[in-house]
Image: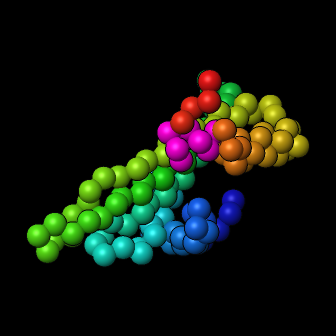
């Protein structure tokens, strides 16, 4: 199991955002990027794994990313809106490590694909 450590994610600038570990609670690892004016503006990342069981032969991996956007209104900093990403990978327990590596690479490739990125970055689906 990987160490509970910083996770660095780059945006489109590219600027790196460091999500520092905060706590593990109920099998969920929580991280925060505290580069904001208020604590309500912290970007958060959570990672969760649920192992396969005798009644459910699949492993589940959930990733959640919350990105609040702050603005100043009448001298007070408030959260204007929050963008959220939620993903869940369902991984059959009988997959080999090579099959899991290929699956992970396909997911990363999908997120890097221009058409798929366009759905979120330009709100312009190409269908």
Q: Position of residue 22 (x, y in %)?
A: 45, 69
Magenta span contains residue 37:
no
Above or below, comparing residue 90 to residue 82 in the picture: above
Above or below, comparing residue 106 to residue 68 in the picture: above
Magenta span contains residue 121:
yes
Q: Position of residue 26 (x, y in %)?
A: 45, 51
Residue at the (35%, 52%) spot, across then down:
82
Observer-nearest of 26 and 64 = 64
Residue sitting at the far right: 98
Judged left or right of residue 33, residue 62 is right
Judged left or right of residue 101, residue 26 is left
Q: What secondary structure is the stretch in magenta mostly built from?
A: helix
Quadrant for the N terminus, please: bottom right
Residue sitting at the far left: 74
**Residue 97 quadrant:** top right
Residue at the (42%, 75%) spot, across then down:
35
Above or below, comparing residue 79 to residue 111 in the picture: below
Q: In the rendered image, is residue 19 in sight?
A: yes
Judged left or right of residue 37, residue 45 is right
Residue range of the region highlighted in magenta in the rendering: 116-123
What sort of colour scheme is used for the picture?
Answer: rainbow
Residue at the (83%, 42%) spot, across then down:
102
Residue at the (26%, 60%) spot, across then down:
79
**Residue 87 quadrant:** top right
Above or below, comparing residue 75 to residue 114 in the picture: below
Quadrant for the C terminus, please: top right
Q: Position of residue 32 (x, y in %)?
A: 45, 67
């Amino acid at each position: 199991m990987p160490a509970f450590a910083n996770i660095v994610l780059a945006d489109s600038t590219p600027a790196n955002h460091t999500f520092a570990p905060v706590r593990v609670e109920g099998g969920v690892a929580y991280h925060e990027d505290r580069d904001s004016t208020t604590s309500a503006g912290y970007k958060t990342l959570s990672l969760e794994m649920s192992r396969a069981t005798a009644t459910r032969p699949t492993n589940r991996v959930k990733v959640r990313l919350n990105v609040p956007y702050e603005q100043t209104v009448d001298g007070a900093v408030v959260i204007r809106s929050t963008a959220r990403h939620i993903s869940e990978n369902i991984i059959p327990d009988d997959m080999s490590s090579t099959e899991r590596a290929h699956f992970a690479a396909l997911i990363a490739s999908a997120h890097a694909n221009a058409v798929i990125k366009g759905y979120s970055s330009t709100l312009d689906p190409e269908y």
